[in-house]
C-alpha cells in the first residue's frame, strides 16, 4: 500500500481561480475590491519571501493589497498605532502582521489591537473563542487550510479518531477545535504527553504541527491513516523538512501531504478566503 499524495499546490491553484471569478463578478456589480494590508517588521529573509508570495496571490485573484514595511526598531506604540489606522481604513478588509516579530514587541498586544472583523489570520482571541463555541467566523489560516485539504479528498470526519501533535495557540489548538467541530474525537499531544506513540497509533487522522524534522516515524502511524504534515523546518542546506518521516510513512498511510507543497499553499488560500469573507461582511453583503 502506498499513500496518495495530497497536492496542495494543485488544489490552491483551482481555488484561486474560483476566488478570481468571484472578485471579477464583484467588480461588474460596482463593488470595491477586497483589500488586504500586510505589516512586515524588519528584514527577516524568510518573512520577506512569505510576504512576496502573499502579494503575488493577491495580484492573481485581483485583490487590492498594500505592504507596510517598518523598521525592526519600531516601538510597540507606533506599531499598534499603525494597526489602529488600518482598522479605520474603509478600503482595507484584512490586516496581517507577519511573524516572527522582534523580541521587544509583545505579539499578544499586537494581535489584540487588530479589529476582530479584520483579523484575517484568525489569531484574535475573539475569533479563536468563536471557533471554540462552534460559531466560527474568521478561522486560523493553517488549520482552515488543512480542513480544505481534507474536504477535497472527501474525508468523512464524523466518528473518526484524530490526533494533533502540537498545541500552539495559532496552529495546534485551533486545529483540534476544527476537527472537533467536524465531528472527530480529538487527542492533542504536547510536550507533557505520556506515551505519545501509543496515542497517535490509534488515530485515523494524524496532524503534526511541531516543526521538528522527522519527529513522526512510521511506527506511530495506523495503517490507512490520513497524515497531514504542518511542521516545516529549513535545514542548513536550505532544504525544507517536515515533521513526518515521509518516505516510510507514505508506505502505510492512505493519504499524505508533502513538504513543501502540501499545507503551505492552502494556508495562503485560507488567508484569501478570510479576506473575501471579511470584505463581504464589511461591505454588507
Image: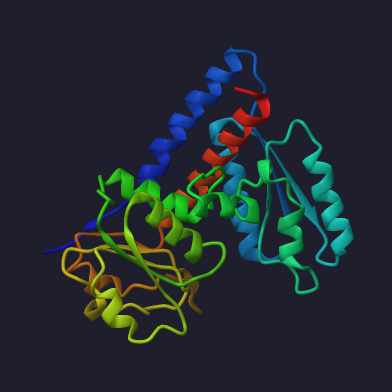
Query: Residue shown at 84%/49% (left/top)?
Result: 82
Question: Which quadrant of the figure has residue 250?
Answer: bottom left
The answer to whether residue 238 is left or right of residue 35 is left
The answer to whether residue 165 is left or right of residue 234 is left
Question: Which quadrant of the figure has residue 160?
Answer: bottom left
Q: Position of residue 209 (x, y in %)?
A: 44, 68
11 w.r.t. 111: above or below: above
Q: Position of residue 264 (x, y in %)?
A: 46, 56
Q: Residue furthest top?
A: 29
Of residues 226 and 256, the one drawn nearer to the viewer in this rendering: 226
Of residues 153 and 156, the one drawn nearer to the viewer in this rendering: 156
Q: Give the number of marks.
A: 0
98 w.r.t. 278: above or below: below
The answer to whether residue 51 is left or right of residue 179 is right
Q: What colour-coding does the image apply? A: rainbow
Query: Residue shown at 85%/63% (left/top)?
Result: 76
The quarter of the rendered structure image containing the N terminus is bottom left
Residue 165 in view here: yes
260 w.r.t. 138: above or below: below
Q: Position of residue 180 (x, y in %)?
A: 39, 56
Query: Residue shown at 26%/47% (left/top)?
Result: 153
Query: Residue shown at 60%/28% (left/top)?
Result: 280
Q: Position of residue 127 (x, y in %)?
A: 60, 50
Q: Residue furthest left?
A: 1
The quarter of the rendered structure image containing the C terminus is top right
Residue 74 in view here: no
Amino acid at each position: 500500500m502506498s499513500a496518495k499524495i495530497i497536492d496542495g499546490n494543485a488544489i490552491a491553484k483551482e481555488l484561486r481561480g474560483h476566488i478570481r471569478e468571484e472578485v471579477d463578478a464583484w467588480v461588474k456589480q460596482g463593488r470595491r475590491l477586497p483589500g488586504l494590508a500586510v505589516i512586515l517588521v524588519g528584514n527577516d529573509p524568510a518573512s520577506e519571501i512569505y510576504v512576496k508570495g502573499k502579494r503575488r496571490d493577491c495580484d492573481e485573484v485581483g485583490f487590492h493589497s498594500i505592504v507596510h514595511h517598518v523598521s525592526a526598531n519600531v516601538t510597540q506604540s507606533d506599531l499598534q498605532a499603525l494597526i489602529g489606522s488600518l482598522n479605520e481604513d474603509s478600503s482595507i478588509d484584512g490586516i496581517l502582521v507577519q511573524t516572527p516579530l522582534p523580541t521587544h514587541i509583545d505579539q499578544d498586544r499586537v494581535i489584540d489591537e487588530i479589529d476582530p472583523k479584520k483579523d484575517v489570520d484568525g489569531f484574535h482571541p475573539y475569533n479563536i473563542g468563536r471557533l471554540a463555541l462552534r460559531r466560527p467566523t474568521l478561522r486560523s489560516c493553517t488549520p482552515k487550510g488543512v480542513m480544505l485539504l481534507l474536504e477535497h479528498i472527501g474525508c468523512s470526519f464524523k466518528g473518526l479518531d484524530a490526533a494533533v501533535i502540537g498545541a500552539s495557540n495559532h496552529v495546534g489548538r485551533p486545529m483540534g477545535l476544527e476537527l472537533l467541530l467536524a465531528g472527530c474525537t480529538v487527542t492533542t499531544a504536547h510536550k507533557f504527553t505520556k506515551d505519545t506513540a501509543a496515542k497517535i497509533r490509534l488515530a485515523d487522522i494524524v496532524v503534526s504541527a511541531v516543526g521538528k524534522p522527522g519527529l513522526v516515524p512510521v511506527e506511530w502511524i495506523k495503517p490507512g491513516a490520513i497524515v497531514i504534515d504542518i511542521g516545516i523546518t529549513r535545514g542548513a542546506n536550505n532544504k525544507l523538512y517536515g515533521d513526518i518521516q515521509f518516505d516510510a510513512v507514505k508506505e502505510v498511510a492512505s493519504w499524505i501531504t508533502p513538504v513543501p507543497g502540501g499545507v503551505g499553499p492552502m494556508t495562503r488560500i485560507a488567508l484569501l478566503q478570510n479576506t473575501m469573507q471579511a470584505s463581504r461582511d464589511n461591505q454588507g453583503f
